[in-house]
Structures are given as C-alpha cells and as structure tokens.
Amino acid sequence: SNFGSSNQPSAIKMRQTLDALLIQAPWLQVDGEMQGDVALDGMQRVAVMPHSALAGDANLLVFPNIDAANISYSLMKTAMGGGITIGPILLGTARPIHVLTPSATVRGIFNMTALTVAEIPSDK
C-alpha cells in the first residue's frame, strides 16, 4: 500500500505504527506506508509522491509482520552483497538482544556485536 491505498489489516497496522512513531519519536524523519521500491529509491519517491516527508533513500524499513521482514531482509542482503549488513534487530527489550541467522558472515557477526555493545546502558 502507498499512503492509504489499501485498508487491509497490514496497511492499517502500518498507519498505526506511523502514528505511534510520530508521538514517541517526533525527531525522526518518517513517512507513511509505501511500497519497498518507492521507499528505497528517493528519486522515484519524489516523482511518485512529491509530498513525502522523506529526503533521499530510506535507511530503515518497518514491516507489518515478521514474515515480510525476514523475506525482505534476506533478499536485500543477497542483492546488496559484500556482507555489510546489520540485522535483524529486535526492539523493545529491556537489554540489547539480537539474532544472528545461520548465514551470518564474520562481518555480520562483528557488526551485530558492535551494535549490541553500543546499546549497553552506560550505567551498567
């Protein structure tokens, strides 16, 4: 869906997520639900959605469910090449915790370890 073009449960879920993000993290540059190609290609987004709040290519994608996230992550990781990935990242836990997939490269393990260390609260 692109900005309300669907009223399927997953599209509604994404609109609710946007509302929550705008309230809880108003400093983030975020926009509503959009298809992956439009999110990842800033020039295409400007042509198709000139009123989008985003500038440039998206660097964070939010998915309506774990299946969509896993499929997209695997496709992007393979298409991008180079083994320079960070993720998947779990959010909302009291302490840093992340998942390494069986296909994680040494570079991927290093990236996730660095992220986890950076997330450790400084008072601990």
Image: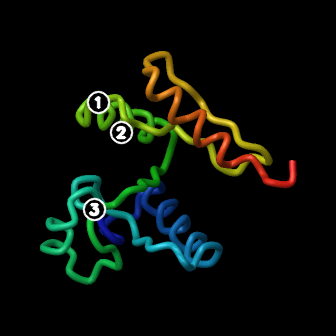
Q: Position of residue 36 (x, y in %)?
A: 28, 53
> Of tags 1 and 3, which is closer to the observer?
1
Per the image, the residue denoted by label 2 is 72
Q: Amino acid at mark 1?
A: Gly
Write the residue at 65% across / 47% down: 118
Q: Quadrant of residue 6?
A: bottom left
The count of marks equals: 3
User: Residue at point 74% right, 46% down?
Assistant: 120
- As drawn, the residue found furthest toward the right would be 124
User: Is label 2 or label 3 in front?
Assistant: 3
* Mark 2 in CB contact with mark 3 (< 8 angstroms): no
Q: CA distance from mark 2 to mark 3?
A: 16 Å
Secondary structure at numbered mark 1: loop
The x and y percentages for residue 119 are: 68, 48
Task: Name the residue rendered at 77%, 44% in the picture.
Answer: 95
Label 3 crowd bin: few (<14), some (14–19), many (20+), radius 10 Å? some
The residue wearing badge 3 is: 57
Q: Amino acid at mark 2?
A: Ser
Instruction: Quickly name the residue at label 1.
Output: 82
Nearest-to-viewer mark from 1 and 2: 1
Q: Residue furthest bottom?
A: 51
Q: Please tell me whether residue 3 is drawn above or below residue 109 in the rendered image.
A: below
Mark 1 → mark 3, Cα distance in angstroms: 19 Å
Q: CA distance from mark 1 to mark 2?
A: 17 Å
